[in-house]
């Protein structure tokens, strides 16, 4: 169906004047042995990069997580399903960028070290897995995935091949420098609360709940000539085209993302998870207050309450629709939660390690601060809340098996079978 | 079955969308009433479900959407019956929806019915979904629904396999892999030698999903001979198979795969596979 999507040509989408010579100007890191922690470094700290998805967020991660963190990159290849986006990529990044309508051609290239993924989220997992299988390090826009099982598959692939992964949000890098946050992190990771955590963390507002509702009256439109709609839909069902489903507003539809919860929770949960030491687990109970969900369009919600096995409560209060969350009051974890003996024990424990930036992590072949398991667990919070609100009921979750307990239908949203030829 | 006037009146109780076309202005009270509405509709049983289906209208390019309320209402019903204590109603709704597949209704509507069956359906509708695997417009929707339903789905997919062709066949093989169908072991192995690249990839994935200890030789041979995207996928299937065998305590079988991958993936661009295989090999010791 899609395997013949080679470099872009003028008959389909125009081929840019890509030059092999330009592509060779940057020496891929594997050529100079940079994979080994003791091996030589490349001639300069310049990553040979490929870009998958050339829309609004394209290149933001390359800037934020490579350039702003002291390294540099050269873009050699870019893929998108929209001709206009591809042409913009060439204008923005230079003539050396070879253009493709199929992202698989980018990950196949042997001269690329890092792939930056900025497609709509229903593609993120497949692109991440393909990149990991091809030995690329990965920058992935948030939200990391569309559903929970995708996240586990990405984690498996990234870990199997020892890849460095950084999610497209960086709140934890600031949080980990705050003495107060570091103290909470230390308390939570110490185990001294003994599953009797009284903490209540409330994220009030910051979710554009109303803006992120899909159009239930969208009149089907002809597919624009410059768009490969089938490839855009990819693993998601093919619907009649409407411009709202393509571009920025894809966020409002279950097929591609998951509304304000999915789009913003990764930002807020990234520092929360580090501070509260939840990078390796997920909530066990989830309850939401929301309007009855529409089958295809995201609809308004009021709040989500998520409880962890150790007693910690996390609340996402949309603060735009319905009543505000008032079941519990915010309560920070602090030293007074520990008795004197436990406080002494805490003092003896080492401080948390500093987080590595993406370039540092690549250099040292270690996890980046926004690593793959943390990113998966962060977006799992949003997915769980969305499952609860889509079904209009409380769910219980097993964070080890990553399955909803005793609710077969809820698990149909944990793992959503993909349209052929795609699979996790 | 045409919708009764009573059903139409119930559907009309669903609030209008707001001017912008979404349900932003839906109040929490109206939302609660919509949930009650689903229960009210269900009191009319199968007749009302069929009536809702009859109110659905095929979306057409450039035309206003004409079935917003029944479309929403049918989903509310499908969600409602997935709740606790609703097993009998759930099966009744799923069967009613399935009874509308395969006829003259526009394919877009049938796709929507399958989508809702994917949510609320169970074993009782797998046979009907199996028939839809032969429909060139519906096969993939039906296959996805079967994979989501799980119970009884693998047998239906297997039974359909001799009769499906082209992309439908790919879809069926993929979903057998999703379901980890051990009875499909030979199907997966044979797929490795097919002309269609996607079928070969599906076969390799299936082998890794069922952790088939009899398949490494065929899989490794196929992976070694593959190029580009296929090579990435088949190599990964081999590594996944080795990991699964190791997890199942089959260390010698896993070690053989890891050793093969470690000694054959010598190109610098495959160093990550070699290193993964070496880590796997060490874990078998």
Image: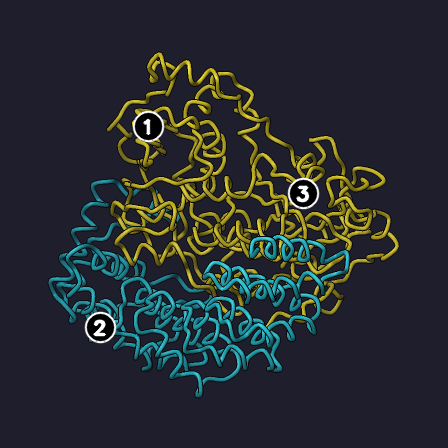
Chain colours: A yellow, B cyan
Sooner in the amino-acid sequence: mark 1 or mark 3? 3
Q: Is residue B135 visible?
A: yes
Chain that bears disc 1: A
Kindly identify which residue carries mark 1: A194
Kindly identify which residue carries mark 2: B96
Residue at 42 percent across and 64 percent down: it is B63
Q: Crowding near pointer 3: few (<14 within 10 Å), some, many (20+)? A: many
Pick the residue in front: B247 or A323: B247
Kindly identify which residue carries mark 3: A59
Pick the residue in front: B37 or A381: A381
Chain that bears disc 2: B
Residue at 39 percent across and 28 percent down: it is A191
Q: Secondary structure at mark 2?
A: helix
Left or right side of B111 for A32: right
Question: Which of the two discs, 1 and 3, sits closer to the camera?
Answer: 1
Pick the residue in front: A255 or A376: A376
Residues indicated by labels 2 and 3 sit on the same polypeptide chain: no
- In the displayed structure, would residue A410 be above or below residue B263? above
Pick the residue in front: A386 or A346: A346
Chain that bears disc 3: A
Q: Secondary structure at mark 3?
A: loop
Q: Secondary structure at mark 1?
A: loop
The disc at residue A14 is none
- In the displayed structure, would residue A202 be above or below residue B241? above
Residues at marks 1 and 2, CA–CA distance in whole angstroms: 51 Å
Residues at marks 1 and 3, CA–CA distance in whole angstroms: 44 Å
Q: Circles 2 and 3: CB distance less than 8 Å?
A: no
């Amino acid at each position: 169906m899609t395997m013949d999507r080679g470099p872009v040509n003028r008959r389909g989408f125009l081929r840019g004047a890509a030059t092999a010579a330009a592509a060779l100007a940057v020496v891929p890191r594997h050529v100079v042995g940079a994979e080994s922690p003791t091996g030589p470094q490349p001639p300069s700290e310049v990553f040979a990069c490929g870009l998958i998805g050339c829309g609004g967020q394209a290149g933001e991660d390359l800037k934020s997580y490579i350039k702003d963190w002291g390294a540099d990159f050269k873009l050699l290849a870019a893929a998108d399903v929209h001709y206009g986006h591809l042409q913009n990529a060439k204008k923005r990044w230079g003539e050396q960028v070879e253009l493709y309508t199929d992202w698989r051609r980018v990950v196949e290239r042997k001269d690329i070290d890092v792939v930056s993924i900025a497609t709509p989220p229903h593609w993120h997992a497949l692109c991440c897995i393909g990149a990991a299988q091809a030995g690329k390090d990965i920058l992935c826009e948030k939200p990391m995935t569309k559903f929970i099982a995708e996240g586990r598959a990405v984690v498996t692939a990234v870990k199997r091949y020892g890849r460095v992964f950084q999610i497209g949000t960086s709140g934890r890098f600031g949080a980990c420098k705050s003495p107060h946050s570091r103290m909470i992190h230390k308390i939570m990771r110490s185990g001294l609360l003994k599953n009797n955590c009284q903490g209540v963390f409330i994220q009030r507002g910051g979710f554009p709940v109303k803006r992120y509702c899909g159009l239930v009256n969208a009149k089907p439109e002809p597919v624009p000539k410059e768009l490969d709609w089938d490839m855009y839909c990819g693993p998601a069902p093919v619907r009649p085209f409407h411009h709202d489903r393509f571009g920025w507003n894809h966020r409002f539809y279950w097929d591609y993302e998951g509304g304000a919860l999915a789009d913003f929770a990764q930002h807020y949960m990234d520092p929360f998870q580090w501070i509260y030491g939840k990078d390796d687990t997920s909530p066990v109970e989830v309850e939401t207050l929301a309007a009855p969900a529409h089958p295809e369009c995201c609809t308004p919600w009021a709040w989500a309450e998520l409880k962890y096995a150790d007693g910690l409560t996390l609340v996402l209060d949309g603060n735009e629709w319905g009543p505000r969350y008032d079941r519990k009051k915010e309560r920070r974890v602090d030293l007074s939660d520990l008795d004197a003996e436990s406080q002494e024990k805490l003092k003896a424990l080492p401080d948390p390690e500093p987080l590595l930036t993406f370039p540092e992590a690549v250099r040292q072949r270690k996890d980046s601060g926004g690593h793959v398991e943390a990113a998966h667990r962060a977006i799992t919070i949003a997915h769980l809340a969305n499952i609860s609100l889509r079904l209009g009921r409380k769910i219980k979750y097993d964070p080890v098996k990553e399955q909803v307990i005793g609710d077969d239908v809820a698990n149909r949203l944990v793992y959503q079978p993909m349209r052929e030829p795609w699979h996790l | 079955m045409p919708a009764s006037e009573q059903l139409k009146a119930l559907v009309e109780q669903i609030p209008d969308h707001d001017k912008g076309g979404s349900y932003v202005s839906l109040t929490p009270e109206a939302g609660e009433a919509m949930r009650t509405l689903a229960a009210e509709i269900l009191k009319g049983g199968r007749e009302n479900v069929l009536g809702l289906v009859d109110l659905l209208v095929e979306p057409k390019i450039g035309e206003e959407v004409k079935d917003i309320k029944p479309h929403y209402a049918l989903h509310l019903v499908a969600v409602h019956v997935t709740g606790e204590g609703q097993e009998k109603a759930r099966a009744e709704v799923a069967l009613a929806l399935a009874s509308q597949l395969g006829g003259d209704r526009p394919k877009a509507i049938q796709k929507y019915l399958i989508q809702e069956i994917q949510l609320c359906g169970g074993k009782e509708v797998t046979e009907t979904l199996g028939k839809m695997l032969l429909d060139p417009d519906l096969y993939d929707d039906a296959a996805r629904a079967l994979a989501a339903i799980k119970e009884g789905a693998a047998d239906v997919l297997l039974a359909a396999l001799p009769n499906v062709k082209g992309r439908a066949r790919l879809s069926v093989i993929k979903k057998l892999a999703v379901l980890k169908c051990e009875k499909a072991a030979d199907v997966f192995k044979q797929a490795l030698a097919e002309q269609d690249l996607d079928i070969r990839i599906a076969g390799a994935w299936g082998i890794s999903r069922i952790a088939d200890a009899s398949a490494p030789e065929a899989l490794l041979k196929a992976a070694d001979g593959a190029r580009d995207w296929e090579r990435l996928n088949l190599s990964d299937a081999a590594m996944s198979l080795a990991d699964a065998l190791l997890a199942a305590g089959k260390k010698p079988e896993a070690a053989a795969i890891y050793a093969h991958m470690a000694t054959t993936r010598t190109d610098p661009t495959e160093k990550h596979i070699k290193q993964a295989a070496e880590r796997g090999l060490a874990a078998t010791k």
